[in-house]
Amino acid sequence: MRALIDGQEDGRIDPLDRGLQYGDGLFETIAIAEGRPRFLEWHFERLKEGARRLGIPAPAADLLRAEITRVSTTPRSVVKILLTRGIGERGYRAPKNSLPRRIVLGFDWPAWPPEAATKGVRVGWCRTRLGRNPALAGIKHLNRLEQVLARSEWDDDAMDEGLMQDDRGQVIAATQSNLFARMDGRWVTPRLDQCGVSGVMRRAFREWQGARGEPVDERELGMADVERASALILTNALIGAWPVRELAGRRLAIGPDASAFNAWLGGT
Amino acid sequence: MRALIDGQEDGRIDPLDRGLQYGDGLFETIAIAEGRPRFLEWHFERLKEGARRLGIPAPAADLLRAEITRVSTTPRSVVKILLTRGIGERGYRAPKNSLPRRIVLGFDWPAWPPEAATKGVRVGWCRTRLGRNPALAGIKHLNRLEQVLARSEWDDDAMDEGLMQDDRGQVIAATQSNLFARMDGRWVTPRLDQCGVSGVMRRAFREWQGARGEPVDERELGMADVERASALILTNALIGAWPVRELAGRRLAIGPDASAFNAWLGGT
């Protein structure tokens, strides 16, 4: 792992950094494919939207671009950017003129479950729910305890991902990926105006489908809706699209869309 | 500010610490009064309960006691303890055998609004709501963006604290203090089984009232309930009890209870 903290290789995280104290910040996880950061402008757009909502000044895109290049030492790797409100005093009140902090981390490409992208993954239901707050919905902020608790519900390899509902029982996403469900011959995806993260690969999948003349609607999806879906796909910035081959023990058909999308993605 | 990281004065926060990456941890803010940490056993109880819920091993109380003594260099000061799940890999899944990290910070006693404890404080309503999640309710975890956003709603001195509602409109607490409302001749305080932090001073105020034969019930309180309360009191570990002299422009009577409680607290 290579780390730049405000551009410095030997930079330190101050214990008073509000990212640590309160989760007062944002992050992005970016795939580096064939040496280039994938969908970088969309990652920057979401980071900027999150920064606007939290009232944190966003760093210049050129600065981030240069730092991404510095930490991504192999052509296929992962870069994670954290943006925090920087150092504060004790107390929730943010200091006027606080200097936001950038942390840019380079990681190896992860080891996925074998054949996840082609043969599909096994998915179950998490018990941990997502609380709803429109002020935080959609953006990729650093308050992620709900996902951490949900991911701690299983530790064997019998399940690859877990689906999460909000406190009303609406299905929102999986712990680290967005969800698409095939309903009545169309792909639909949960609305994310109450909770959840609006993924960059979710956007890519929607736009790709739209360009093929298959627009993907956002709607509310209950557990029963997802259970009667004829097919499910999970997306995130690193995995692209994974078809789901099993939901809570039920076999699902794997259509051609995930493979076609991943093939297109490989060519972007 | 003095800082000990896992007991080391020159300790470092790793950028992969899950406290920073996900807010995956807990904190306690402890008043040091006349050289002694106040209600320390109750702080430890809450920390332990939070650690149990998040599945983080809690540090030994003796170790924390020694570190609190090391960082609290003046007889009247503040100690903040952070407990994180420690260093992780990328991804929400916690590593097996992760080593939790302790951060113990010593601060000066804060400057309060003048005469807050005797003449009362001015309180308004925050627009930012609290999402509900029973899995996280009550404990003092590091996911505090809702409080940060609420506290950013005002930056003048016309308001000392802001009351927060959950997404249903139930009043839960102020941004950094718990709430007591005088209703029909009795003190009541909001239930915290859906969101909010179960404060140590809230517990002290309830137990003190109970010992005087005035049990304080927990119940659901709507905005209209709080607005018709004959008196309001805010509590937290540092301030003790602050009476509210004004709620959103309406004057409130200041009874004897906050002063009597603070006097008792000064003698503990």
Image (cartoon, coloured by chain):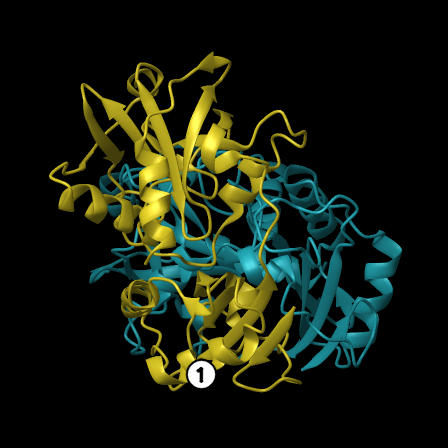
Chain colours: A cyan, B yellow
- Residue B166 left/right relative to B6: left
- Locate residue B156, reporting x and y percent: 68, 29
The chain ID associated with circle 1 is B
Which of A226 and B231 lies nearest the eye of the viewer? B231
| Residue found at the very far left of the displayed protein | B213
- Locate residue A6, reporting x and y percent: 80, 66
**Residue shown at 18% from the left, 18% from the top:** B184
- Locate residue B260, reporting x and y percent: 32, 39
- Locate residue B37, reporting x and y percent: 41, 67
**Residue shown at 85% from the left, 52% from the top:** A60
> Residue B17: in sight, yes or no?
no
Residue for badge 1: B66
**Residue shown at 48% from the left, 28% from the top:** B119
- Residue B36 left/right relative to A163: right
Quadrant including the C terminus of chain A: bottom right
Which of A195 and B182 lies nearest the eye of the viewer? B182
